[in-house]
Amino acid sequence: MKRIYLLLLLLLAGSLAGCVSSQEDDIRLWMVQERNQTKPRVAPISAPKQFIPEPYTNASAIEPFSNQKLTQALKRDSSQAASNGALVAPELARRKEPLEAFPLDSMALVGSIVKAGLPVALVKVDNLLYQVKLGNYLGLNFGRVTKINETEVTLREIVQDAVGEWIERAATLQLQERSK
């Protein structure tokens, strides 16, 4: 009985092996035919557009490097320097407040209160708590407090730009959440 099962099993395995090779040959033949029939389609590249130069129409205008242009620029700069100098002159004449000795990044806004109907910010510097009102000065850049609310203090600072001119800029001190 075992021999009959063994013989049937061999016969079945042989018939399956014969089927596999014929199907594989059919697939390979179909792939070769499809590959030969398929031709890629490539769109031709369009011709480049012709460059047409524009004529220079500002030949009659003032030359950008002329002495006249330079004189106008120097006059304009000297009038701006005089007005910018007026920004910092009053700041240099007044007495400094204690919080002007510290940079803004070393300060932390830890809260705000209302005292006599006016907002007061609580600023912590070097483990000391200071009360800051509108008009007080903070930081190293002549920063004057212009607005106080629950989450921030807004300052108007006077700083020098890259050219050395004095300009105004806005700065803020944000409320610091307590870290655990």
Image (cartoon, helix red, strand yellow):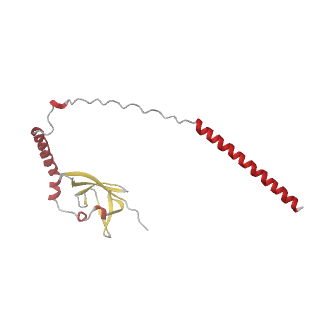
The total number of labels drawn is 0
Query: Relative to residue 11, is residue 63 depicted above or below?
Result: above
Side of 99 relative to 150 (left or right) = left
**Res. 89 visible in picture:** yes
Q: Where is residue 87 in the image (x, y as percent from the top left)?
A: 17, 51
Image point (19%, 31%), residue name: 58
Q: Position of residue 169 (x, y in %)?
A: 26, 52
Asked where in the image residue 113 lies, by quadrant, the reply is bottom left
Image point (13%, 42%), residue name: 73
Q: Identify the image quadrant of the C terminus.
A: bottom left
Image point (14%, 48%), residue name: 81
Q: Identify the image quadrant of the N terminus.
A: bottom right
Q: Which residue lies furthest to the right in this view?
A: 1
**Res. 117 visible in picture:** no
Asked where in the image residue 8 lies, by quadrant, the reply is bottom right
In front here: 119 or 56? Answer: 56
Side of 177 relative to 107 (left or right) = right
Asked where in the image residue 36 lies, by quadrant, the reply is top right
In front here: 78 or 50? Answer: 50
In front here: 126 or 64? Answer: 64
Query: Relative to residue 49, is residue 113 depicted above or below?
Result: below
Image point (69%, 47%), residue name: 24
Q: Where is residue 16 in the image (x, y as percent from the top left)?
A: 77, 51
